[in-house]
Amino acid sequence: MKSWISWRGHRWLGFPARLYLGWVFLIACVHKILHPGSFAVDVATYQFLPLSTVNLFALTVPWMELGAGALLVLGIRVRAAALVVSGLMVSFMIALAWALHLGLDMSCGCFASQAAAENDPISWHTLGRDAGWLLLGLYVLFFDHHPIGLETLKRRQDRCVT
Amino acid sequence: MEPKATELSGVHPGCQPRLKEDSAHDQPDHRDEVTGPNVTELSGTQPACEPVSKGNSAREQPDRCEHVAGPKPTEPRGIRVERQPNGRAAHVPRSGGSFGIVVRDGAILVAVTLILGLASNALRPNDKIAWIQQEEYEILVPCPEPTGEVTAMAPDDPALKDSASLVIDARSPKEFGSWHVPKALDIEFDWLGPPIDEEVKRVAKQVAASQSHRVIVYGDGDDPDSGREWARLLSGGGIKNVFYVTGGGPALKQRLKEVSVP
């Protein structure tokens, strides 16, 4: 098991996983950052968070997606970014499961507002998609110990200089 | 003997490792030989390792290694040594270090993005929102209502004239007044109305009282068809043998010649 965890091939498997996951989060954050009011309504539609926390969630989560997505793509503090991404995915999945349990006929609001995504209703398929992204995040978190990216590149250059 | 650079296979291409200046030229650098576990931390917590000779001569080759107090290693934090399959050692940069460091970095990321989010909202010229919402958002989410399976029926189906069929007109009272199937009940389907549990129960009682074998619903024939939606709700409410007429009222009016304005 230890040799499997320390297998150096993980960096080559983790690299496309990171790029894909980072791309997904970068795409997802754009609308939410540009239109926080719409995203706040989307969050409220889930009827999951208390009203007092809806706006704070809507204001901060898109920037977390932006930061974590950028770090994943660039290869900086990859495992920390994967930890944040995994945490976000868990929270999204709980909210989704809650909405599905209530039987709410609504759109996900993951990449666009409710109004712009009428043809993207939440379903167990949506939950499965999020579970896939969560698995990717956990893979990067626990296995990609030697990520390909700027941080590793800079570390090598620093060691060469010294 | 010339100093021999230790091979760092595959780890630092084009980068030569630095040799210990204070070691004897004929003494190998034991810091590159991992004698214990596979991975040795060089983060300043391990005591230095010095070769110990068997004999008195300092030029004899050492055969073991003891940990003694000494200066801390000069490798930067976050570097570890891994034993390679060929027995050589490799200096490997650690990404994020232990899980505690990962959690710490994650917390920093969250804190920074939290500040960024709040600051960006404060700097918005127009559409900034309050940190804490005071009034409830106006959310329009259709109430979930149980629906069941229904069967389509052609407008010229003889079952429409069968006395064992209970026919329901789901159109508006105005449309019902202008034209309807004989003996049809006027029970309008309200798209935006409240939950219709009571209405379904009322229809169920009528079905039971009429001793009908089937319920046939026709609506406006649009897309979506109010007749089909009504039929699905009735079926979801526990009524069996519910049908809807394909094309709704307009199709029926064209097909059934005996229909007349009351």
Image (cartoon, coloured by chain):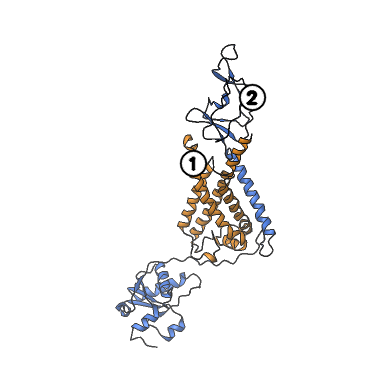
Chain colours: A orange, B blue
Q: Quadrant of residue B213?
A: bottom left
State the mark number for residue B21. Answer: 2
Residue farthest to the top, as pictured: B56
A126 vs B100, left or right, is left
A95 vs B251, left or right, is right
The quarter of the rendered structure image containing the C terminus of chain A is top right
Hey, what amino acid is under mark 1?
Answer: His
Q: Are marks 2 and 1 in contact (CB under 8 Å)?
A: no
Of the pair A150 and B244, the residue shown nearer to us: A150
Task: Name the chain letter of the residue that bears numbered label 1.
Answer: A
Give the answer, above or below, for where A93 lies relative to B153.
Answer: above
Task: Name the chain letter of the residue that bears numbered label 2.
Answer: B
Give the answer, above or below, for where B56 lies relative to B186.
Answer: above
Hey, what amino acid is under mark 2?
Answer: Glu
Identify the residue under disc 1.
Answer: A10
Q: Position of residue B40 (x, y in %)?
A: 56, 29
Query: How far apart are the alpha carbons under marks 2 and 1?
Result: 37 Å
User: Does residue B262 appear in the picture of this structure?
Assistant: no
Q: Position of residue B112 (x, y in %)?
A: 65, 49
Give the answer, above or below, for where B158 lies relative to B140.
Answer: below
Of the pair B233 and B28, the residue shown nearer to us: B28
Instruction: Report crowding for label 2: few under 14, some 14 to 19, many 20 or more residues within 10 A (C-alpha).
Output: few
Give the answer, above or below, for where B211 lies relative to B139.
Answer: below
Q: Position of residue A28 (x, y in %)?
A: 55, 57
Of the pair B205 and B58, the residue shown nearer to us: B58
Q: Are marks 2 and 1 on the same chain?
A: no
User: Does residue A61 appear in the picture of this structure?
Assistant: yes
